[in-house]
Image: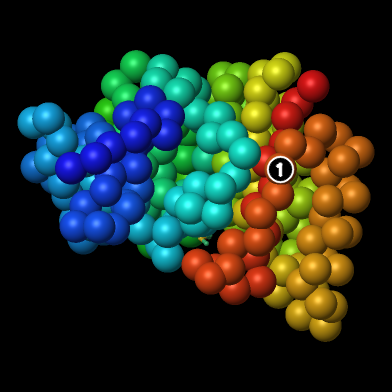
Amino acid sequence: MKVSRVVDNCLWILNKKRKVLATKNLTPGKTVYGEPVLKVKNKEYRVWNPNRSKLGAAIHKGIKKIPINQGNIVLYLGSASGTTVSHVSDIVGSSGLVYCVEIAPRVMRDLVFLAEERKNLAPILESAALTKNYENLVVQADFIFQDIAQKDQARIFIKNKRFLKKGGYAMIAVKARSIDVTKKPQTVFDEVEKELRKHFKIIDKKRLEPFEKDHSLFLVKNE
Ligand code: SAM
């Protein structure tokens, strides 16, 4: 099996002539969303499905940088039940921490079960738009990831910049149809980019097709 490192605890694995992305399982023997596992040098890796994760899709599309490392503090906005969160949790490992902000109690319930197994997850049942309500619960993050299908998703992302360390990176997965169904997706992405540019340096952007229709992911830096 041929492997190449992507970032800490994350590999491309050539498996049966297919290149798959996978993260080193923080909780060996346990999977999260029915993903297959592979053994590399006696270590267990969980396959990261790009059709179930916009961050996984952006890596498949060749995003310039994946700014997450072992030991990092991550603020994840819109964590749902923890599909992508679980891979971020693998990458930061037991010395890192992922704050998971999620508004919906139903999915938060599953996330709390996941956090019982994965000790580096800190679930926060709150709206990411109401930063004041969790400002006392979080510390400055090395990386912020947002995946929230809301009309004001760019505004919410910018509001959370206050929790990003100077020099830190952030990503936002933008769903065009949540912002304006009447406009062409590219027009919506251009408008979001213009807004983001006022607050961050844009490092890269990727459309997420074929994994996600009418989605674009922006990688920005807090300079
Ligand atoms: N990122 C997840 C993943 O890859 O596993 C999927 C996220 S799903 C597309 C979007 C999530 O954002 C939903 O669970 C939704 O409840 C949540 N959400 C929507 N508005 C929110 C808000 N204002 N604050 C926090 N979470 C929100």
- Where, by quadrant of the figure, is residue 114 drawn? top left
Q: Is residue 165 left or right of residue 73?
A: right
Q: Which residue is mark 1?
A: 204
Residue drawn 59% across the image and 34% down it: 65
Q: Nearer the viewer, residue 86 or 114?
A: 86
The answer to whether 17 is drawn above or below residue 127 in the figure is below
Residue at 83% over, 44% down: 196
Instruction: Kindly identify the residue that appears in the image at 71 percent across and 43 percent down.
Output: 204
Q: Which quadrant holds residue 180?
A: bottom right
- Which of the image's four quarters has the C terminus? top right
Q: Amino acid at mark 1?
A: Asp
> Please, what secondary structure does the residue beneath circle 1 have?
strand
Numbered marks: total: 1
Left or right of 202 on screen, residue 84: left
**Outermost residue to the bottom:** 182
Q: Position of residue 46 (x, y in %)?
A: 24, 46
How is colour applied across the structure in the image?
Answer: rainbow
Q: Quadrant of residue 35?
A: bottom left
Indicate yes or no: mark 1 CB to ligand 1 under 8 Å. no
- Rendering coords of residue 125 (x, y %): 48, 46
Out of 68 and 130, give the one closest to the viewer: 68
In the image, taking residue 40 as reference, residue 65 lies left or right, namely: right
Q: Residue at x 65, y 35 (%)?
A: 170
Other residues around mark 1 within 10 Å, as few (<14) / some (14–19) / many (≥20): some
Is residue 92 among what the camera can see? no
Q: Is residue 214 left or right of residue 102?
A: right
Relative vertical location of residue 36 with respect to residue 180 in this rendering, above or below: above
Work out which quarter of the rendered image holds the N terminus and state it: top left
Residue 163 percent coordinates (x, y):
66, 26
